Image (cartoon, rainbow, N blue to C red):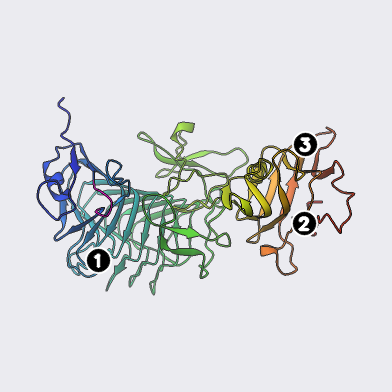
Amino acid sequence: MKRAADQVVTSNANSGAGTLRQAISDVTTGGTITFNLPAGNETVTIASQLVINKALTIDGANTAGSGVAVTVKVTTPGTSPWRVFTINASGFTINIQNMTMLGGSTGGSYGGVMTIGSGTTVYLTGITMSNGKSTYGGGVYLTGINAKLYVSNSTLSNNSATSMHGGWCYNDQCSVTVSTSTFSGNTAVNGGGIYNSIGSCYLLNSIIINNTSPSGADLYNTGGSMYAYYSWYNGTSGTISTQATAPNVTTAYVSGDLGALANNGGSTKTMAVSSASAAPDNGTFVYYNATDGYYFLDNQASPVSHKLIAWATSPTVIPSNNITTDQRTVTIGNPPTIGAYYLIPVHVASTGGTSSADYYTLKEAVDAINAGTHQGAITITLNGRTVETASVVFNASGSGSASYTSVNIYPTATGLSISGNLATPLIDLDGADNVTLDGRVNAAGSSKDLVITNTGTSSTSGTSTIRFINDACSNTPLVFKRQFYPIPAVL
């Protein structure tokens, strides 16, 4: 079989040789379009919609160019009367990844950023989509029969169905599958986030929150089927099918739970989650392969796998199927965060050495302090739960490379914990001085909320939750400050 003629975009002009429009025309079925655009030229402005009618992949990472991912936009986002993509490719699959799409205002021509026609399958991965406006489907409109849309590791915000339904998406007789994505700030008359008409919609490990509509602010299901697992949403209309062993969060949005759409690392803009929001620690790991599609594990003591589009089907869990990074390509830790942005649970700030860094466990952070990476006055803030698989050992300042004057540790939200199941101390202060472990949120007020637990039951000497050794508990408080505020079920 002759290999498809791949295309490389070298011009950000609307049309002509080397442009995205020409590449879509020239690429043969099954081919791939990539970009080689220099710094300052990563935005492609189109004067009319781009039409796709064949199988292809468009990768906007621009690795051959500046390394800055491509933005494809209409002339005036939110105003120009055309969309970015019209995709009518029945029987074909289109993959678009690592790209920002800024749509227009298409009015009665539905879909402000994208329309997907009958029988077409579209995968969107690592996409940021904004500014689309339309009567139906401010962002995306699926029409006809058997169109399929799969969205993962993407952020969809600030789209609007100006007079009808589906702020981000209107699904009519088709299928929408969403995983590890964030939908926020979209508006509509009905279904500010997603409006599901007669089709099916599956949501996994996704945020659909702070969208606006008089009815079904986040999710609106009228005549179809809508399923949600390990997701965060609040305003709904119609039936949302759920499972107790794959719990969703339905708490209301509070101002500040999500940051504005911004460059938070990675190739496309995302919305950072607050440690005080419902997203951290309440997600799940998502798996994918071509046979089973997306699948995941429930939260039973002996977890059972479930195919996203068929709960009763239990695929064999293959570790290599695990989607290990978020939209920014940040490695997802355990427990995962709901949505496209994984909140790394431990942050260290210091007056000397490396001034700021994030870590997945308290042990990683303390090991870095012991290695002299962070020095001087050090603050460790806990933004999520940590599960420690080895003892967190604080060495004394001056021991080895450790060099600090103080270490202050506190949570930034309620409900956080440091836990482990160890036959050793969970936290071991080995002669460490001036360490303050403060259970109060943001080290303020009087409420103590941090829980520290070692569930290990070994009879091995030293097994404990917190241990003081090598003079760590017999120094004068005028010199050594070790304050352990009362923390529930820890000491």
Q: Which residue is mark 1?
A: 77
> Would you call the spot at circle 2 few (<14 residues within 10 Å), some (14-19), or many (20 or more)?
few
Could you tell me what secondary structure mostly forms the magenta stretch? loop
Q: Residues within 10 Å of mark 3 (few under 14, many from 20)?
A: many
Of label 3 and label 2, which has the lower sequence position?
Answer: 3
Q: Is 38 part of what is drawn in magenta?
A: yes
State the mark number for residue 488. 2
Q: Position of residue 318 (x, y in %)?
A: 47, 31
Q: Is residue 80 left or right of residue 238?
A: left
**Structural distance between the alpha carbons of marks 3 and 2:** 20 Å
The residue where tag 3 is placed is: 424
Q: Is residue 317 visible?
A: no
Magenta-tinted stretch? 37-41
The foreground one among 402 and 83 is 402
Q: Residue at x 58, y 62 (%)?
A: 276
Under circle 1, the secondary element is loop
Residue 468 seen anywhere in this rendered image of the structure: yes
- Which residue type carries mark 1? Pro
Q: Residue at x 55, y 60 (%)?
A: 278
Query: Residue 335: horizontal and vertical position, in percent?
Result: 57, 47
With respect to residue 239, does 466 lie above or below? above
Three-letter amino acid code at the position of disc 3: Thr
120 versus 220 height, above or below:
above
> Which of the numbered marks, if any, corresponds to residue 196?
none
Residue type at mark 2 is Pro
Separation of marks 3 and 1 at Cα, in angstroms: 58 Å
